Image (spheres, helix red, strand yellow):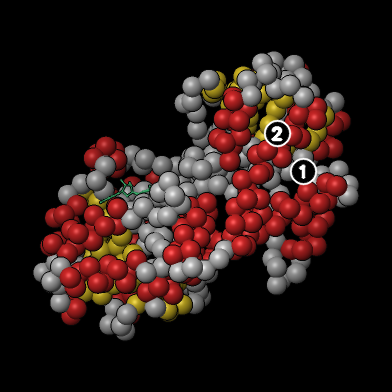
Amino acid sequence: MRICVVGAGYVGLTTATTLADLGHDVRCVDIDQGKIDNLCQGKIPIYEPGLQELMNKNTQRNKLHFSSHVEESIRDYPIILIAVGTPSKEDGSSNLSFVSQVVEIIGSTLNEYKIIITKSTVPPGTNEWIHQTLIEMGIEEELFDIVSNPEFLREGTALWDIYHPNKVVFGTKSDRPIKVLKKLYKRGKAPYIFSSLTGAELIKYASNAFLATKISFANEMAHICDAYEVNYSDIAKGLGADPRIGRHFLNAGLGFGGSCLPKDLSALKDSALRKEVETKLLDAVMEINANQIEIYLKKLMTELPDLTDKQITVWGVTFKPGTDDLRSSPALRLIKQLVQRGSQVHTYDPMVQLELAEVSSFSDQYESIRDSDALIIATEWEQFHECNWTEVKSRMRGSIILDARNCIDGKIVKSEGFIYLGVGRQ
Ligand SMILES: NC(=O)c1ccc[n+]([C@@H]2O[C@H](COP(=O)([O-])OP(=O)(O)OC[C@H]3O[C@@H](n4cnc5c(N)ncnc54)[C@H](O)[C@@H]3O)[C@@H](O)[C@H]2O)c1
């Protein structure tokens, strides 16, 4: 099939590449000329394991092309897959201006039947709005089908997730595009979930809201464990053994971040309020998450009461391991708080050299801790689990480790003479 993927970000690029790998003829377009220039030279603008190799393979076999000619490409391809960003506005609602730009182009160029697939995460009612907008632009209903097809990939494991989905969700207004849609993806044993346009949109929001709820629940439980001097990891194990609950997303730590959970929660809350529905649970989930940074700072200050002029090293700045994405990263919020309190902050991350005023970023993990008073682990990159703690101890001035992801072995670092601070960890 001939597919035009609009937007060459984390979702668009991985989707375009995997669709090409499945044998479709794919053109991926973006308004960012720099991004397209790089892609045309074979350079991917993001870090996603395995993506570079898969992209090279499919550009070489002529299945995958890149272009900044958005209008021409949308006009020429029969299947349009929208994967542009839908960031949060100041008030928490979803900024749909990128989606609107694409819809405008579709409406002004459409002259033969097209299937328009929305993969971007959009608030309930958006795909109905796209349908209505095209009708109002004078396009006959027979000439298009809108499909709401939310994406559930996780950055860092995006290729695996696309090839091994646990479901494929399609929201449609009619059965007409279904035959084509069923040939689009590799789904293994994953079920198709068919719904209305708005139903499919809400499946995505409900999923992210539920995952965020699990994280905030875990964090609250970890604080209760702290108060009772109990290891939260035992509780997570016990909870996770119940298949009705499951072990995923039960780790305690700095809280959730990234380009999806915080923005999707805010957009869902906004959508609910527009229909005068209260969101007490979502509000609590967001409030618990927002408080996590303060709780960890307080923990640090039990050992280092005055943070002014203290040198603090933060390991991990991305919102989670396996990605270079800094969007809404809790580590960044923590770093900004430390700077505000007068600390000199050093950072190290395996993927990102942070460019922030008042912060010194290092490319060497061990150099970053030289003469530091405390080390904070803010993102659980695998290499932090297994580092040489004797070496770390000999380079630091102080001996405090704040493990804000409960990811290192407290016993080992304590045996090296460190003061180890986790949450819900005795
Ligand atoms: N990143 C994730 O893990 C993830 C997972 C599931 C769903 N989503 C959703 O997928 C969507 C895209 O997310 P992302 O992380 O890939 O965003 P991104 O910011 O990485 O990429 C979006 C791209 O769209 C391009 N763009 C904007 N307007 C355009 C236009 N008019 N024409 C062509 N290109 C245009 C931008 O230049 C950018 O390259 C969002 O709605 C997001 O919520 C993201």
Q: Which residue is mark 2?
A: 297
Q: Quadrant of the N terminus?
A: bottom left
The residue positioned farthest toward the front in the image shown: 276
Residue farthest to the bottom, as pictured: 175
Residue at 70% x, 22% y is 307
Left or right, 300 with reference to 153: right
- Identity of the amino acid at label 1? Val
Q: Is residue 151 above or below residue 322?
A: below
Mark positioned earlier in the residue sequence (2 or 1): 2
Q: In the image, which is nearer the foreground, mark 2 or mark 1?
A: 2
Which three-letter amino acid code belongs to the residue tagged 2? Leu
The circle on residue 384 is none
Of residue 417 and residue 272, the one placed in the foreground of this image is 272
Q: Is residue 210 left or right of residue 179?
A: right
Which class describes the residues within 10 Å of circle 2: few (<14), some (14-19), or many (20+)? some
Counting from the top left corner in percent of width and height, residue 362 is at 55, 23
Residue 193 rendering spot, x and y as whole percentages: 46, 77
**Crowdedness near tag 1: few (<14), some (14–19) or many (≥20) residues, C-alpha within 10 Å:** many
The kind of secondary structure element at disc 1 is loop
Q: Are marks 2 and 1 in contact (CB under 8 Å)?
A: no
Label 1 belongs to which residue? 423
Task: Answer with the quarter of the image where residue 180 lies.
Answer: bottom left
Q: Secondary structure at mark 2?
A: helix
Residue 21 in picture, x, y percent from top left: 35, 59
Q: Where does the image place residue 314, in percent across and percent down from the top left?
A: 63, 29
Q: What residue is at 15 percent from the left and 68 percent from the top?
A: 137
Residue 95 visible from this viewpoint: yes
